[in-house]
Amino acid sequence: MSREYHFHCEHAGCSVTVGLRTGRTRELELLVDGKEVAAARVSGHRARTQVMTAILPTDPPRDIEVEVTLPGAFGGDPVSFLLADGERRPMPARDVPRRSRPTEASWYS
């Protein structure tokens, strides 16, 4: 069963968001100002840390890294940190609305 997580923070005037979909293969995407700048796929259910890098469109451009700690097979929630300017800042989790399934009434419309 898959589940989705989103983490978000603002840095240097840019919006930085991490999307994570768990399941058989865990898929990560890194967005800066709403545009995908990095993606990764992780197989297996072992706990691990995945690091993605990006360049912020500032003047001058700045390098950032995002570290996502993935839980193991026995559960837990993922955690994300923004690594930039010599700091390691936690990225707060955002609520992800669940996708609704079609109801029987919608089958007839």
Image (tube, grey):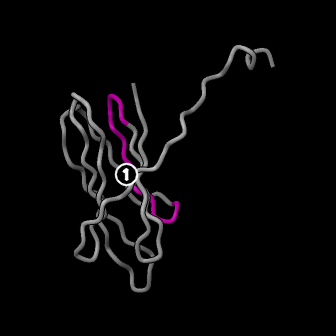
Residue 27, position as x, y percentages in the image: 36, 41
Residue 90, position as x, y percentages in the image: 31, 60
Looking at the image, residue 69 lies above or below residue 62: above
- Residue position for label 1: 39
**Going 47% across and 76% down the picture, which residue do you hit?**
13
Between 1 and 87, the one nearer to me in the picture:
87
Residue 28, position as x, y percentages in the image: 36, 47
The quadrant of the picture occupied by the C terminus is top right
Left or right side of 96 for 91 = left
- The number of callouts visible is 1
Looking at the image, residue 65 lies above or below residue 51: below
Q: Assess disc 1: are there few (<14), some (14-19) or many (≥20) residues with their C-alpha within 10 Å of its C-alpha.
A: some
Between 77 and 66, the one nearer to me in the picture:
77
Looking at the image, residue 31 lies above or below residue 99: below
The quadrant of the picture occupied by the N terminus is top left
* The magenta segment: 22-34
Residue 5, position as x, y percentages in the image: 41, 43
Q: Secondary structure at mark 1?
A: strand
**Going 46% across and 50% down the picture, which residue do you hit?**
94
